[in-house]
Image (spheres, rainbow, N blue to C red):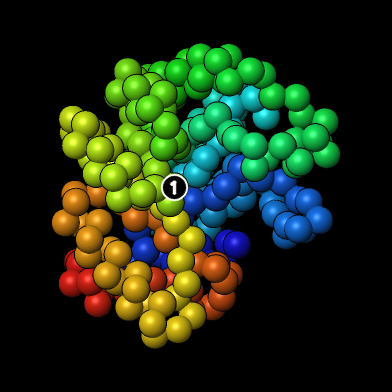
Amino acid sequence: MVAAAQRAEAAGIDLVVAYDHYPKPARPEALHGLTMLGAIAVATERVQIGTLVARIGVVPDQVLISQIRTAARLAGPGRFIAGLGVGDHLSDDEDEALGITRPSLDERFARLEVVATTLRSHGIDVWIGSRSRRGAALSAAVGAGRNLWDPTDQQLAEAVLEADGRPITWGAQVEVTTDDGVAALAEKLAALADMKVAYAIAAPTKAGAPDAAEQVMRSKKLAGLP
């Protein structure tokens, strides 16, 4: 993962993110996201790094805040983005296997607001990862950016329209192992740029492939973006 981040930086990628998941039978390669970001922070110089997303309720809030502040300090000023979220049912099996009992959704959203506000008070950029109206309202309340993972065109358009200057970002898994895949991503990136989306988080299906970053940058070039 460190080597992949270094290749991404060399290729011109703007941001490298890590998810907040743990090993399970279908995902034995998973490594702890914030620990890995610490390694990436000291192994790179320019590329921004961040969580997408760190989930509320996996660890105590003050532990999460401390972990993120540590990674941000290792990265240096302006390089870290704290993507935060409340998690969903896709993590149920993983949490059960790890003995994690998540609080209610209401409590997780309340704690998310506190964590986001605290991190912003320390000068750390925050994105709220959510497609829901509740996530949109919280993003506006704390003045944070917002990430929509694999949203519909309508969801993304509404988010951009109501952003009021806050960054709206898009993310999805992409296929860039073929020329058709590269061309499809280029078309998507051009459309996102036209919509004034701040960041496109492209997760290649073979993220660790030696040419993954170069293929993503090839799509960006085809889209006519700087």
Q: Is residue 69 left or right of residue 14?
A: right
Using the rendered image of the protein, determine whether residue 216 is visible from the camera's viewpoint. Answer: yes
The image position of residue 221, as x and y in percent, is 25, 75
Please state if 194 lies on the left or on the right of 151 as rendered.
left
At 29% from the left edge and 45% from the top edge, which residue is drawn?
154
Describe residue 4's horizontal placement relative to residue 26 as left or right: left
Q: What residue type is labelled 1?
A: Trp
Q: How many labels does the image show?
A: 1
Residue 52 point in image, percent of width and height? 50, 44
| Helix, strand or loop under label 1 | strand
Residue 210, image x and y in percent?
54, 78
Relative height, residue 17 to residue 84 (above, below):
below
Relative to 198, residue 88 above or below: above
Pointer 1 residue: 149
Q: Residue 24 in the image: state x and y as whole percent.
A: 78, 51
Q: Is residue 152 left or right of residue 30?
A: left
In terms of image quadrants, where is residue 15? bottom left
Q: How crowded is mark 1: few (under 14 residues within 10 Å), some or many (20 or more)?
A: some
Q: In which quarter of the image is residue 63?
A: top right
Q: In which quarter of the image is residue 133?
A: top left
- Tell me what residue is drawn at x 80 percent, y 35 percent: 96
Is residue 82 at all visible to an observer of this figure? Answer: no
- The residue depicted at 44 percent of the width and 35 percent of the height is 130
Quadrant where the image shows the N terminus: bottom right
**Front-lying residue, 155 or 101:** 155
Identify the image quadrant of the C terminus: bottom left
Name above or below for residue 97 compared with residue 177: above
